[in-house]
């Protein structure tokens, strides 16, 4: 086993790429999608590129991971029976973001742990701009 392979197994995050949404920065594995704008003013990242996603079948149930990034003031996402959810609020000078990780119930534990590391990587870097202007609660 080469040193590179040992390092990849010990620290898979070393090959992750940086994704920026406004002043929010995330580290995501290679192969994850770019942020896609969604109708509520937020963004979603998927663990697969669009051309590799198949919605609503057994493959989806065993592999789908979504990371939603929205204003913390936005109307909450409706619950999903087919996905486990983990949420974080990340605050900065331009406001706070809700980062919601949704993992399909059939996803293996090791892959879910990797997705949770993506969630925990969310940080604010002060740029003075916010990319998210979500619909407000009670607005």
Image (tube, helix red, strand yellow):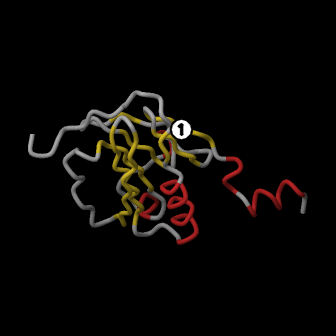
SS class, disc 1 = strand
Q: Residue at x 32, y 43 (%)?
A: 70
Q: Name which quarter of the figure residue 10 lies in.
A: bottom right
29 sits to left or right of 50: right
The relative height of residue 86 versus residue 97 in the rendered view (above or below) is below
Q: Position of residue 13 (x, y in %)?
A: 66, 53
Quadrant into which the C terminus falls: top left
Q: Position of residue 79 (x, y in %)?
A: 24, 61
Q: Position of residue 49 (x, y in %)?
A: 51, 41
Q: Name which quarter of the figure residue 60 lies in.
A: bottom left
Camera-nearest residue between 123 and 10: 123
82 sits to left or right of 92: left
Q: Residue at x 41, y 52 (%)?
A: 66
In the displayed orientation, state which residue is furthest to the front: 93
Residue under numbered circle 1: 19
In the displayed orientation, state which residue is furthest to the left: 138
Marker count (numbered): 1
In the displayed orientation, state which residue is furthest to the right: 2
Q: Residues within 10 Å of mark 1 (few under 14, many from 20)?
A: some
13 sits to left or right of 57: right
The relative height of residue 61 versus residue 139 in the rendered view (above or below) is below
Q: Position of residue 63 (x, y in %)?
A: 48, 60
Camera-nearest residue between 98 and 42: 98
Quadrant into which the N terminus falls: bottom right
Q: Residue at x 71, y 50 (%)?
A: 14
100 sits to left or right of 34: left
Q: Residue at x 55, y 59 (%)?
A: 117
């Amino acid at each position: 086993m080469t040193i590179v392979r040992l390092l990849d197994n010990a620290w898979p995050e070393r090959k992750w790429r940086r994704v920026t949404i406004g002043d929010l920065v995330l580290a995501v594995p290679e192969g994850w999608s770019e942020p896609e704008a969604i109708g509520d003013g937020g963004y979603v990242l998927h663990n697969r590129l669009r051309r590799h996603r198949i919605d609503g079948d057994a493959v989806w149930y065993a592999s789908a991971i979504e990371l939603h990034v929205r204003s913390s003031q936005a109307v909450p996402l409706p619950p999903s029976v087919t996905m486990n959810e983990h949420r974080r609020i990340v605050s900065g000078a331009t406001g706070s973001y809700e980062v919601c990780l949704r993992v399909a119930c059939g996803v293996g534990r090791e892959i879910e742990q990797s997705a949770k590391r993506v969630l925990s990587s969310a940080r604010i870097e002060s740029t003075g701009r916010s990319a998210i202007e979500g619909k407000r609660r009670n607005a």
